[in-house]
């Protein structure tokens, strides 16, 4: 416990950084990582001074990381939005340190000296491109969005009465100025929301839109990346913490659902069978058997991926197995006629000479190839039971 903590967003008494909390963290945690930009550096210099700050870094009580980029949301015309990472092209770590130091000491020489020396004592931190990719992926997670939007709205306008069930979707809707644009549709009455907000906050000089919600989803996803990359706890805003909890709940809930679905599938579909892994470990399957089964399971896995999140595996499997095919709906004599005609065309049955001999030789094989020909001719639909019953079960049945 208390091995490492990263402080990203902890405000207090109008300051962007809670210095008292930072000091308390040094007492209890083995390592404290602090993500900073201009405002945080000003606070550190104001409360600690250069000497004490350098000493705390030297003895390993805090590790300061300079934030090279930030997450932000954008508002485009026609009610479209986007999220991305942003960094200044005209500023670097030394210029920011120079500006922060100058806020307290109006001396160019000392400002430059501090910036040059201190920049060598701290590392940089930036969000990789994968963070934005993960944020965009959340736009397709309808369950998460439906749970996150009420949390956001209750946080900023607690007096607003939400619909009984919140509906929301985010769809890609073109580009603007080189950025992907997204439209957000929901059943929230934004006019009423802003009216209630203005009623309880008469001095508010802004209109609420969805940009803040998108920023909250982005920041929480960024926080998850930070805590994973630094292998630490993270201190962030209360709202972002709630979003992180929702995200983790969603992950845990999905895993729990998947585990239950697989257990039911094994109980009812793979009864009297051991698991594939157990069969291999117990020597029932050879390495070659394992590779062959996995290779043949590609279509089965593809079928699994297309099952809607809200549906259950056992029910979908049953529906797929019981689904009638086109061939099953055709009269038997019609199927036989189609098969015969196709076989005739395929073998070139003209009834004379060498072709007739070929037809006679091929005719013996037609019966064995009925299923193959029917699959091709009648476009028979593949069913997951074909893999389960013909490939998997015979190898793992006990």
Image (cartoon, rainbow, N blue to C red):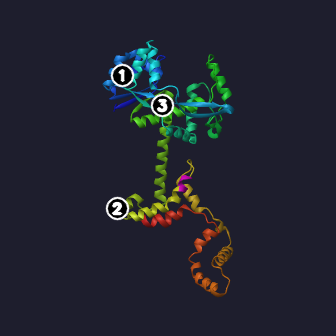
Q: Which residues are magenta?
A: 302-306
Per the model, the C-alpha gap separating discs 3 and 1 is: 20 Å
Q: Residue 113 in the image: x percent, y percent? A: 39, 18
Residue 188 disc label: none
Secondary element under disc 2, as helix, strand or loop, is: loop
Decide whether the magenta segment is chiefly helix, strand or loop.
helix
Q: For the N terminus, which image quadrant?
A: top left
State the image quarter where residue 234 is shown. Answer: top left
- Mark 2 crowdedness (10 Å alpha carbons): few <14, some 14-19, many ≥20: few
Q: Earlier in the sequence, mark 3 or mark 2?
A: 3
Residue extending furthest left? 59
| Residue 276 position in % (x across, y down) | 42, 59
Q: Residue 185, position in %: x, y?
A: 65, 37
Q: Is residue 226 visible?
A: yes
Please give the name of the residue rendered at 60% of the width and 31% of the height, measured from the top-left corner.
74
Marking on residue 282: 2
Which residue is under mark 3?
241
Image coords of residue 21 (percent x, y): 40, 21
Task: Of the two numbered discs 3 and 1 on the same chain, state the one appearing first in sequence.
Answer: 1
**For the point 47% across and 46% down, which residue is it?**
255
Disc 1 packing (10 Å; few <14; some 14–19; many ≥20):
few
Query: 112 or 369, which is in the foreground?
Result: 112
Q: Residues within 10 Å of mark 3 (few under 14, many from 20)?
A: some
Q: CA distance from mark 2 to mark 1?
A: 54 Å
For label 1, the residue is 24
Position of residue 182 relative to residue 95, above or below, is: below
For numbered disc 3, what is the local secondary structure?
Answer: helix
Q: Is residue 89 above or below residue 107?
A: below
């Amino acid at each position: 416990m208390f091995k490492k903590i990263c402080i990203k967003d902890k405000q207090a008494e109008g300051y962007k950084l809670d210095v008292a909390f930072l000091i308390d963290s040094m007492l209890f945690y083995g390592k404290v990582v602090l993500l900073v930009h201009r405002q945080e550096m000003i606070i550190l210099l104001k409360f600690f001074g250069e000497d004490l700050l350098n000493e705390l870094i030297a003895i390993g009580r805090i590790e300061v990381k300079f934030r090279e980029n930030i997450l932000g949301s954008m508002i485009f015309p026609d009610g479209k939005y986007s999220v991305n990472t942003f960094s200044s092209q005209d500023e670097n770590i030394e210029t920011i340190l120079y500006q922060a130091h100058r806020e307290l000491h109006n001396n160019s020489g000392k400002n430059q000296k501090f910036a040059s020396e201190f920049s060598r004592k701290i590392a940089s931190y930036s969000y990789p491109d994968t963070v934005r990719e993960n944020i965009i992926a959340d736009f397709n997670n309808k369950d998460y969005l439906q749970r996150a939007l009420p949390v956001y709205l209750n946080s900023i306008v607690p007096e607003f009465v939400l619909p009984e069930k919140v509906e929301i979707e985010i769809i890609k809707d073109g580009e603007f100025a080189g950025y992907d644009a997204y439209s957000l549709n929901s059943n929230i009455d934004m006019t009423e929301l802003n009216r209630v907000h203005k009623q309880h906050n008469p001095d508010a000089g802004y209109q609420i839109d969805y940009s803040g919600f998108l920023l909250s989803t982005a920041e929480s996803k960024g926080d998850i990346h930070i805590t994973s990359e630094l292998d630490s706890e993270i201190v962030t805003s209360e709202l972002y913490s709630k979003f992180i909890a929702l995200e983790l709940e969603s992950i845990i809930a999905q895993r729990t659902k998947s585990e239950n679905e697989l257990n039911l599938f094994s109980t009812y579909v793979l009864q009297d069978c051991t698991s594939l892994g157990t069969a291999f470990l117990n020597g029932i399957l050879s390495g070659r058997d394992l590779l062959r089964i996995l290779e043949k399971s590609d279509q089965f896995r593809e079928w699994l991926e297309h099952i809607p999140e809200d549906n259950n595996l056992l029910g979908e499997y049953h529906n797929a197995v019981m689904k009638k095919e086109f061939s099953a709906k055709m009269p038997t004599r019609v199927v036989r006629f189609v098969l015969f005609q196709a076989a005739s065309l395929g073998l070139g049955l003209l009834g004379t000479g060498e072709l007739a001999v070929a037809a006679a030789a091929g005719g013996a094989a037609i019966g064995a190839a009925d299923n193959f020909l029917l699959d091709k001719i009648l476009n028979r639909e593949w069913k997951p039971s074909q893999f389960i019953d013909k490939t998997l079960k015979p190898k793992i049945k006990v």
